[in-house]
Image (spheres, helix red, strand yellow):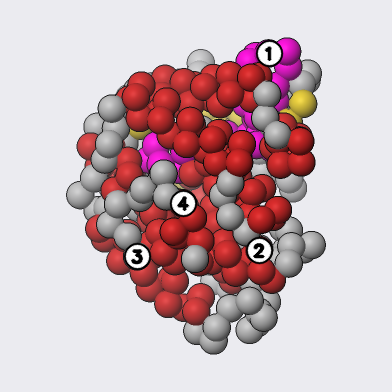
Amino acid sequence: MDLKRENLEAYLRSLYGNDLSLVSLQKLGETIPTTEDVKGFGYGSPLLVEYQIAGKNGSCVLSSMRLQHGFGHDHFSDRARILIWQNSTFAGLPKHVPSLDVGYFTGRGKLVSAGDASEYFMLMEKVEGKEYFFDLERVKEQGATDLDHDRVIALSNYLAEIHSVKNDCPPLYLRKIRETVGDGECIFGILDDYPENPSFLDPDELQEIEKVCVEWRWRLHGKAHRLAQVHGDFHPWNIMFREGTDFTVLDRSRGEWGEAADDITALAMNYIFYSVQKSLRLTGDLKDLFELFFENYLDKTGDDELLEVIAPFFAFRAVVVASPTWYPLLSDDVRRSLFNFLENVLASKRFNFRDVNSYLD
């Protein structure tokens, strides 16, 4: 990125007043200052900035993070998070150089301050519709209609379409697998929220589950060819249906690229979840919808390998729906069935979507 002198000067004036004038710019590690624009800023050394205010000299150092894949720096939001954190903590450590501000570059190269921020927000359009979990509640109690089958087809078609967009970037795939197992919002983080010695689990059972999940992480280590466009949190509370099969999705999460199995299990786990609440089995119309969802997706994509990588993603979604925090009213029998499912799936090299009840035993 080229850093224009006039944009930097305007930014500094927004912080220190209109009396400021820019004197020189110099990449740290180089010896010759310049009064011109800086080519390729952000790809090399930080920039030493010299200025004057009312005849007094001042200086500061401007730096940014280089765009790279790996080490958790893959996304714009990753780099923003690190810089925001640094701005808020540098001055709190004795003898640490303080941060004067944190900000961002616009698409036109302007510098904008964000240093006064205490929390961030997002503004979105209003969406009409009704969350898909209401459909599953109704199917559990009253049975399915033709519309329910049509909606399953629409949802699996949608996933087949977005997953058809691929990306050749192994670090992003490895990150997805790593975070599914170890992130605070995923398996390890959800299990850390479980109470000590829950009545529906044996002692050390959660520890053993974590060990198996780590084994799965390494089993999927060579599957980077599967990296695809994903939603990231495709569960029934994030799907809004209107008339017929017209729907909108909400709250895309955890990155633009990932493993298709994550989206598949985020939805499919809920057909199991609602059925198990009623009978501790996957039965009736919910079983039909579950199998139709898989059949149509596999038919559209030809992704038979999905069934060989799906286990840790089912484990993630199962520990969520079995969570005493998120679902405090579930019986121990229901939670136990969900843990039977996730442990048996983790123990299988290939998932058989037509025989879910064998995993619930």
Q: Earlier in the sequence, mark 3 or mark 1?
A: 1
Crowd band around label 4 with a 10 angstrom C-alpha radius: few (<14), some (14–19), many (20+)? many
Cα distance, mark 4 to mark 1?
Answer: 29 Å
Q: Secondary structure at mark 3?
A: loop
Cα distance, mark 3 to mark 2?
Answer: 20 Å
Q: Is residue 243 left or right of residue 94?
A: right
Q: Is residue 24 left or right of residue 192?
A: left
Where is the N terminus found, in terms of image quarters? top left
Residue 145 painted magenta: no
Q: Earlier in the sequence, mark 4 or mark 3?
A: 3
Q: In the rendered image, which residue does mark 2 sit on?
A: 334
The amino acid type of the residue labelled 4 equals Val
Q: Quadrant of residue 14?
A: top right
Q: Is residue 299 visible in this depiction of the protein? A: yes
Residue 118 picture location, percent across and down:
74, 48
Crowd band around label 1 with a 10 angstrom C-alpha radius: few (<14), some (14–19), many (20+)? few
* Residue nearest the viewer, comparing 115 with 144: 144
Cα distance, mark 2 to mark 1?
Answer: 32 Å
| Furthest residue in direction left, as rendered | 222
**Which residues make up the magenta segment?**
236-264
Residue plotted at (46% across, 51% down): 356
Q: Earlier in the sequence, mark 2 or mark 1?
A: 1
Asked if labels 1 and 2 touch by Cβ distance under 8 angstroms, the answer is: no
Q: In the rendered image, which residue does mark 3 sit on?
A: 347
Numbered circles on residues, count: 4
The amino acid type of the residue labelled 2 equals Val
Cα distance, mark 3 to mark 1?
Answer: 39 Å
Residue plotted at (64% across, 25% down): 148
Crowd band around label 3 with a 10 angstrom C-alpha radius: few (<14), some (14–19), many (20+)? some
| Furthest residue in direction front, as rendered | 284
Q: In the rendered image, which residue does mark 4 sit on?
A: 356
